[in-house]
Amino acid sequence: RLRLALVFVLLAAAGCSGLFQSLGAKWVTRQIAEEFNLDDAQTAATRASVERLIAAAPAALNSKVDMVVASVDAGISKGFTEEKLLRIERQVDKLVDIVAGAIIDEASPILATLRDDQIDFAEGRINERLDEAREELEKPEDERLEERQDRFIESVEDWADDLKDEQEASLRAYIASLPDESAARLRADEQRLERIAALLRSHPGPEAIRDGLWKEWKSREDLGPDARTSAERRSEGRSTILYVYDMMTPEQRDHASKHLHELHDKLKSFLNAAGS
């Protein structure tokens, strides 16, 4: 799902942790610079911001990541409940808000320096990625459903390893019962793109940009009046986790715990490298 100017920076910072250790801030800066067609001065400011974010990550995130992992692992071991999942949801919300807030604070002064041609360039790049969602919606409904089912099965197998035939059939039926809100999500992304582009073109200064990006971040789950509320989709998400967990065998739950700790170890390695 798109988060416009903010989301690219978030993905660059959070989704490329394995590359941070070998390529570091230089690689991340280059990706951001290419996305926004930054000039030399803006690129230098971005490099300094990325370095500050990386350096601050261990102190800001280590204990909170450990807490989330401990909560999830306890759920895998002893069983999930609605109350436990709500607690984990709140922990994750706090964690990602810290990450988003830090990135917004660093990005806003740089975004305030963008010229109109750079804003046009970045908007075009984002629209190219939205074209993928538009093309997806043009496919036949049954084909889109099958692709959603395949993606869900793959994500479950990452945690549970191989699924039995009856488990896969049950999961496919479950996904088929859920509403497809792809069109509403695309509309929300297009409208968000328009709002942020208009904000940047008004050149209101760093504070107004910071406030605007934070507002977009906090409303990122709002897909508009024709879709379900964020609370309804989150409730569905918790129900989905309970559904999948209940069908998992003890061996699959053991695999899920191992997968969780593998991910945690990778993240800890990144954070330790970032703080060294």
Image: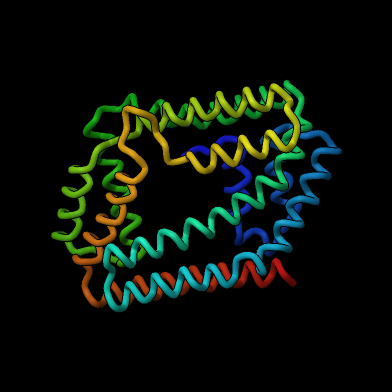
Locate residue 256: give its quadrant. Answer: bottom left
Of residues 164 and 56, the one drawn nearer to the viewer in this rendering: 56
Q: In this view, does 32 lie to the left or right of 82?
A: right
Of residues 20 and 11, the one drawn nearer to the viewer in this rendering: 11
Q: Position of residue 175 (x, y in %)?
A: 23, 46
Q: Is residue 24 visible?
A: yes
> Going by the picture, which residue comes out furthest to the left?
166
Q: In this view, does 275 lie to the left or right of 242?
A: right
Asked if residue 255 is positioned above or below residue 239 in the image, the reply reads: below
Q: Measuring 20% from the left and 56% from the top, which residue is drawn there?
A: 168
Q: In this view, does 122 lie to the left or right of 155?
A: right
Q: Measuring 29% from the left and 51% from the top, which residue is drawn there?
A: 235
Q: Where is residue 218 in the image (x, y as percent from the top left)?
A: 51, 43
Q: Measuring 33% from the left and 55% from the top, which residue is drawn there?
A: 154
Of residues 209 and 78, the one drawn nearer to the viewer in this rendering: 209
> Going by the picture, which residue comes out furthest to the right?
41
Q: In this view, does 37 lie to the left or right of 226?
A: right
Asked if residue 257 is positioned above or below residue 206 in the image, the reply reads: below
Q: Position of residue 73 (x, y in %)?
A: 38, 74
Q: In which quarter of the image is the C terminus?
A: bottom right
Q: Measuring 61% from the left and 72% from the top, which residue is drawn there?
A: 269
Q: Where is residue 29 in the image (x, y as percent from the top left)?
A: 73, 47
Q: Can residue 136 be seen in this view?
A: no
